[in-house]
Image (cartoon, grey):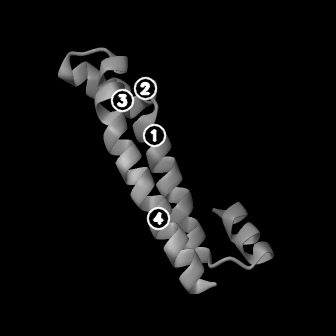
Amino acid sequence: MPIVFLISLALGVNTPLMIGALLSASSFGSHACFFSDLSLLAAQGAGCSPMQHAFTQFPYAMLGAGLSVVTFLGLGYMMA
């Protein structure tokens, strides 16, 4: 977070918007990656392979990513 504050100030970007984008990206990366700890534990609990779990969860992750992109672009233009 200390780096995010400095970058947002240097670029003149809205800091809460940049923090939201960072948290959205990290959540997407954790959810869409087939070898993350979340995916491995969920696959083990469901009794399937991590790749099978990743293929079932990837469409939901992409839906969330698409909605986030549209939302952040809209907010970016409104707050500019």
Q: Quadrant of residue 8?
A: bottom right
Q: Residue at x 50, y 74 (%)?
A: 74
Residue under pointer 3: 39
Q: Residue at x 52, y 51 (%)?
A: 25
Residue lying farthest to the bottom in this orientation: 79
Q: Residue at x 40, y 44 (%)?
A: 62
3D distance between C-alphas at marks 3 and 1:
8 Å
Is residue 45 toward the left or the right of residue 68 in the image? left
Tell me whether the residue at label 2 lies in contact with that at label 3, contact meaning CB atoms closer than 8 angstroms. yes
Q: Amino acid at mark 1?
A: Ser
Q: Earlier in the sequence, mark 2 or mark 3?
A: 2
In the image, residue 42 sits, relative to residue 9, either above or below, namely above
Tell me whether the residue at label 4 lies in contact with that at label 1, contact meaning CB atoms closer than 8 angstroms. no
Q: Quadrant of the C terminus?
A: bottom right
Residue under pointer 2: 34
Residue 31, horizontal then vertical, whole percent: 40, 39
- In front: 72, or 28? 72
Q: Earlier in the sequence, mark 4 or mark 3?
A: 3
- SS assignment at label 3: helix
Residue under pointer 1: 30
